[in-house]
Image: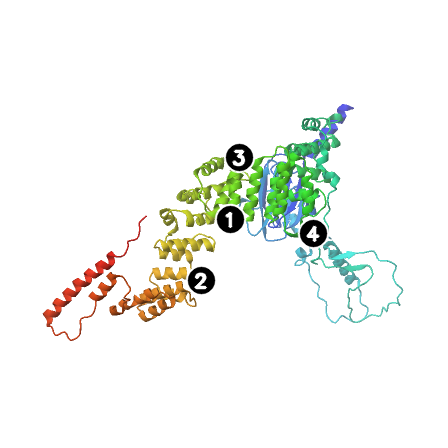
Amino acid sequence: MIRALLILVALAGQAAAQTARVLSGEHDDFTRLVIELPGPVGWTLGRTETGYGFAIQADTQPQYDLAGVWQRIPRTRLASLEADPGGGALVMGLGCDCHVFPFEYRPGVVVLDIKPGPAPAGSAFEAPFAGAVSSVAEMAEKPAAYDWIASRKTEAGARPTATLPLPLETGAVSLEPLRDELLEQIARGAADGIVDMELPGKPPKVAGVDRTALPWSNISIGAEPGLMVTDAYDDGPPPDPVCADPAQLDLPAWGRETAPEDLLAEARSGLYGEFDAPDPQAIRQAVRRLLFLGFGAEARQTVELLGIAGQDRELDLLRSMARLVDGEADPQTPFADMLGCEGPAALWAALARDRLPPGPDANRDAILQAFLALPAHLRRHLGPILAEKFLARDDAEAARMIRDAIERTPQADPATVALMDARAELEGGDAMAAQAHAEAAVALDGDRAAGLVALVEAHLLTLDPLGAEPVEALLALRGESAGASEGAGVDRATVLALALSGQTVAAFRDPDAVGQVLADLWRVAAGRASDDDFLTEAVLPATASPPSVSPETAFAVADRLLALGFPDAAQAWLGPSTRDDPPERRRLAARSALGVGDARGAIALTEGLRDADTEALRAEALLQLGDLPGAEKALAATGDTAASARIGPWKGDWAALDPTLPGPWQRTAEGLAATPAGDSSGPLGRGEQAIAASATSRAAIEALLSSVVAPSVE
């Protein structure tokens, strides 16, 4: 008897092993199918007449379990999915101009992503399907049976529309075709959620119906008994989420009175019953104890002993909690719609999200209450993650409550508290306070990447120089964090730390200096780089375009280039300017134009501006054009009388020079005065006078130049 039972169990296991379960999920940009094959095996994917075909490389195909596919996805991208009755291949019919991109998540698990648009060039999966091609073609030619829940949009172009002659013939008119059509359309509306069906009550007493044949018939749908029309696209409030029972998520009660070592021992014992079959109740209790201890991976391994994912709601909740306890993402979490629930479900829904939405969608009070009820070790572990989500939501008060709860726990880590303070100050914009907290966190735990990243971000706000020690620590941590969740933050901090410590060229040569990191690097370079390093990077080739940076950074780079004497390079960073630009940008663009000799362009850019700086700039442009009266008028508008008086020598009027100017100016003016009229000297005499006047002028000009202090050279 026992031998027969063992044979039956073996046969049942062999049959179950030949079943491939197909899971689904809907995303904004793609629809995902996950095929769990019986084991590691080769597979093929190719194009068919209706979409794609999928098959494993084996003599026989598995039985595909498609029971839960349409519960999570609509029929917008994937219109149909069925197994080929002839060859057993999985046939996908597409409802859009899409392509399928497959990849193997792990041996035996294949993911098919249905994405809009054409497939990548050279994709091997666009070749004709190499499986049961003939069977797939026969399925494409076979007329499909009527599907009561199919989307009307996918069939609207395929269904023929009968054209009836109008007006209809008089006499006896059969309404049977019209009745069938009406019933079919009402059924489609009910399947799409547009029409709600109700059983009719007792019909009211009405007069007899006149059944005289009419030349035409009009049908209108109004407030008739048994028929209720609703708007499927009404922008009303969403349906209430199905919240989990708080008793199923009462994690604090799963091990409050038991020592950790006893909880771990109990979680490892009594998992199997008679005939070594898993005991469902014992496994549930073991998973709860492991979750209380914070052992997410062990809890997930234990719950998989039952192997009934998707069939038990409580076990699905425990599976998701096991991932969230370890800080992992769970795309298929059952907590997705529970953010507004009361009780612990709101906390786990918040941990399952990348960010918390603004507004009342998140039950803030329920999240905080559930967090404060967690055991101390889980508060220390999950608190920083949750506080980060509240900070991203601009809820500093909630983050502060979480921080205080962590600080009050026994054996609280001071470095963690200091790091949370630094991040809170960074979100609040207090750079100095953030820098102080980040320095404290690094001093307490210099090997933690998060503290070094916060320190660099704090220095970035003020552009304060950074020492060499944080740079060396980040370079040492870079290899360890590669591929981890914190890897991108470490790479960014390393590039910026190089620039803040004076290693500008090394920062620009770093392979991670791209995108937003490069934009922030240019902000550091404009404010902290040496002149040589700055010019090496900022003076772009004639055919190059400036990188994508903020307008403020581009202005700072152009301003420094112009100050260093590179107006053409400054124009490349500024780009075209118009009268709608801010005055500071227009003045900088005008100075750049003046530097390259475009005086008229400089004057055009300053039109409408009447401040002193602009008038001085306009006067310089007018001097370049030789418009001395206009330049004199512009300088007079600035109120600088000394500068206005210096226009006289440009006109040859040295006699009108301001008498208050220093002596060298006066002697130069006397030497350059015109020869008195009435001079009757001959040609030789006038030549001798010119030579003497030239020598006097040269001496006066040399004395004038020597009186001017030379600029300092750094």
Return the residue nearer the eye: 711 or 361: 711
Return the residue nearer the eye: 656 or 13: 656
Query: Dot 3 lies on which element?
Result: helix
Q: Residue at x 28, y 68 (%)?
A: 648
Quadrant housing residue 708: bottom left
Return the residue nearer the eye: 436 or 550: 436
Q: Dot 4 corresponds to which residue?
A: 144
Residue 64 lies, in percent from the top left, at 67, 41
Query: Dot 1 lies on which element?
Result: loop
Q: Dot 3 corresponds to which residue?
A: 444
Residue type of the residue flagged with mark 2: Pro
Dot 3 or dot 1, earlier in sequence: 1
Query: Dot 2 lies on which element?
Result: helix
Give the label on residue 121, or none: 1
Crowding at label 3, few (<14), some or many (≥20) Cα neighbours within 10 Å? some
| Image position of 264 (left or right of 661) | right
Give the number of the mark in front: 3 or 1: 3
Res 365 seen here: yes
Work out how far the residue at label 3 is from the one at label 1, CA to CA, in angstroms.
52 Å
Give the number of the mark in front: 2 or 3: 3
Work out how far the residue at label 2 is from the one at label 4, CA to CA, in angstroms.
69 Å
Work out how far the residue at label 4 is from the one at label 3, CA to CA, in angstroms.
69 Å
